Amino acid sequence: MQTVIAAFHDDPAWQFMMPTGYYEVGPFFAATLFDLRVGTGDVWVADDGLAVSMWEPPGGASLSSAEKSAAWEAYRAVAGEDRWNCLAAYDKGVDDVRPMTDHWYLGVLATHPDHQGRGLARAVTAPVRELADSQGLECCLETSKPTNKAIYAALGFTEVSDINIVGGPPTWWLRRPPAKLPS
């Protein structure tokens, strides 16, 4: 989780969701996101954790609604109501633009700041991007960091839409259409 915490310390969305106490609450948030995805086998790591991608498969995570609720309630207990309400506002904005069709959702992509620019993000996203292509499915994500749009464009996330986060930072939904496979 150290990579995720280091990578997101200046992320506008995470600052919005955790306006205070980032280094106290952030690890619990990152761990919750990890716990919700690791069971599906859709967490990818490179270079001993210097880069990580956490995906949700089409149709969402394989956890039961009770398991998801328990994980989020545990986070809520640590985060407190103010941070919880910010997370809810952020999630509502994202849910308003999320496609109803099957897609792979990249919930977290983090490369430790000291190791960016080495192709690690490409490496930890490649397995699911290739799987999505073979399934004919798009990949989607959101970002609130303007500089991330160019990084994601290099990975094929070229369709960009605005997301309205009430009280939150400018945020964009990015889509990567499936690549056409050779026939």
Image: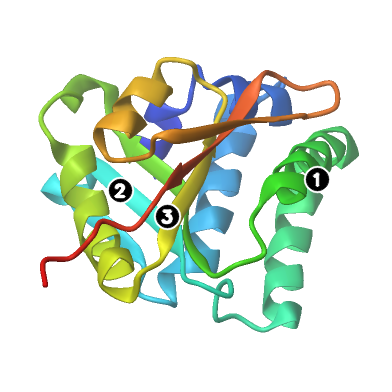
Residue at image location 34% in from the left, 21% down from the top = 150
State the image coordinates of residue 110 (x, y, percent, origin top left). 35, 38
Circle 3 sits on which residue? Answer: 139
Relative vertical location of residue 155 with respect to residue 177 in this rendering, above or below: above
Query: Which residue does the image show at 55% across and 81% down from the upper left?
Result: 62
- Tag 2 secondary structure: strand
Question: Horizontally, is 145 left or right of 113 in the view?
Answer: right
Picture coordinates of residue 108, whole percent (x, y) = 45, 46
> Foreground mark, 1 or 3?
3
Q: Position of residue 60 (x, y in %)?
A: 58, 71
Instruction: Mark 2 vs mark 3: give the one in front.
Output: 3
Name the kind of residue labelled 3 in the image: Cys
Dot 1 or dot 3, earlier in sequence: 1
Q: Residue at x 63, y 37 (%)?
A: 25
Q: Nearer the viewer, residue 101 or 81?
A: 101
| Farthest front residue in view | 183
Give the CA distance from mark 1 to mark 3: 19 Å
Q: Is residue 172 above or below residue 35?
A: above
Mark 1 and mark 3 residues within 8 Å of each other at the beta carbon: no
Q: Amino acid at mark 1?
A: Lys
Q: Earlier in the sequence, mark 1 or mark 2?
A: 2
Q: Are marks 2 and 3 in contact (CB under 8 Å)?
A: no
Residue to which mark 2 is pinned? 52
Quadrant of residue 40 within the rendered picture? bottom left
- Determine whether, in the image, residue 123 is placed left or right of residue 91: left
Q: Secondary structure at mark 1?
A: helix
Disc 1: which residue: 92
For label 1, count other residues whose C-alpha is less than 10 Å away and answer few (under 14), some (14-19) or many (20+).
some
Frontmost residue, 127 versus 63: 127
